[in-house]
Amino acid sequence: MQKRILTGDRPTGPLHLGHYVGSLQNRVKLQDEYDTYVLIADVQALTDNFEHPEMLAGNVLQVALDYLAVGLNPEKVKFVVQSMVPELAELTIYFMNLVTVATLERNPTVKEEIKQRNFVKGVPVGFWSYPISQAADITIFKAELVPVGEDQLPMIEQAREIVRRFNRLYGKVLIEPRPMLGAMARLPGTDGGAKMSKSLGNCIYLGDPPEAVRKRVMSMFTDPTRIHPTDPGHVEGNPVFTYHEVFNPNREEVEELKERYRKGTVGDVEVKQRLYDALNAFLTPIRERRAEYQNRSKQVYEIIAEGTRKGRALAQATMGEVREAMKIAYKFA
């Protein structure tokens, strides 16, 4: 039996380079080795989009297009729509009894995302409790490995704690998942912020056309202490060079640019132009595959439907074991 992966994204819009570095890259690498389920977490997306649920249908398609565009093979990977697996909601409710409010309040990922969203009418209960929902997502598929970005580590630890408590109370039914980090801890935003985020508007999207990529690259933050192109500059902590490290395969060029930047013999414009060239070369095949699938959207919906069917069958099997372990598999039902 292959070991299993569960990972996924909230469909709040198309995916960006941060998603690629954080987990998409690992998903593509591991799809031949693991039984892979990718959850399109539309229920969790409702926690901060509940006033506009009509947006989700289009976003589900956008996310699936990005999955296919980066190289996830639908013959090997199951795309599962969260809301179409009602067993997930049932397991979430059972898990709610295993977590305290204080634990949720301490979760650093939730606290940071609440700060970013600036909820003016108070934080919805659904948003506070989505670590519990995420734990149900992972465990109902009995995933052993979860490719995530660094910011999601507290969420995986929360899931591990819930699994330990469930298994201690009711019997060893669920698998304690392990996180797998991407190639780098996190990709900074184009504004120099610690994280690329849709809500912060500092993203380069996987499907962006060349002119959008160029505009974003040319506006990127660099070394704030460098006033003139002839001033010696700092490479460490400079977002443009961070992107070069990740996306520019020409290592000789990258090292040359670093050396010249430190000496003050290359300007930001040239460094950014070289980055744009590297990013555009990286994104071109992704754009082309995305466009091909977009022209065959009926086929994409069929891929999603088939993946969801397989995902629900697995979820139903797990919930049978969960109810038996909890002694609530009533024979009279």
Image (cartoon, rainbow, N blue to C red):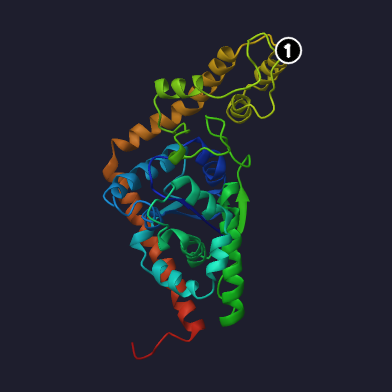
Q: Residue at x 29, y 47 (%)?
A: 55
Mark 1: which amino acid? Answer: Lys
Give the residue at mark 1. 263
Q: Position of residue 260 (x, y in %)?
A: 70, 13
- Foreground residue, 110 or 273? 110
Residue that extends furthest to the bottom in the rendered view of this protein: 332
Image side of residue 279 versus residue 242, left or right: left
| Residue 187 location, quadrant | top right
Q: Position of residue 210 (x, y in %)?
A: 42, 22
| Quadrant location of the N terminus in the rendered image | bottom right
Image side of residue 160 versus residue 70, left or right: right
- Foreground residue, 277 or 102? 102
Q: Is residue 206 above or below residue 62?
A: above
Callout 1: SS: helix
For label 1, the crowd category at 10 Å Cα-Cα, with few meaning under 14, some 14 to 19 and many 20 or more, is some
| Quadrant location of the C terminus in the rendered image | bottom left
Q: Is residue 274 above or below residue 71?
A: above
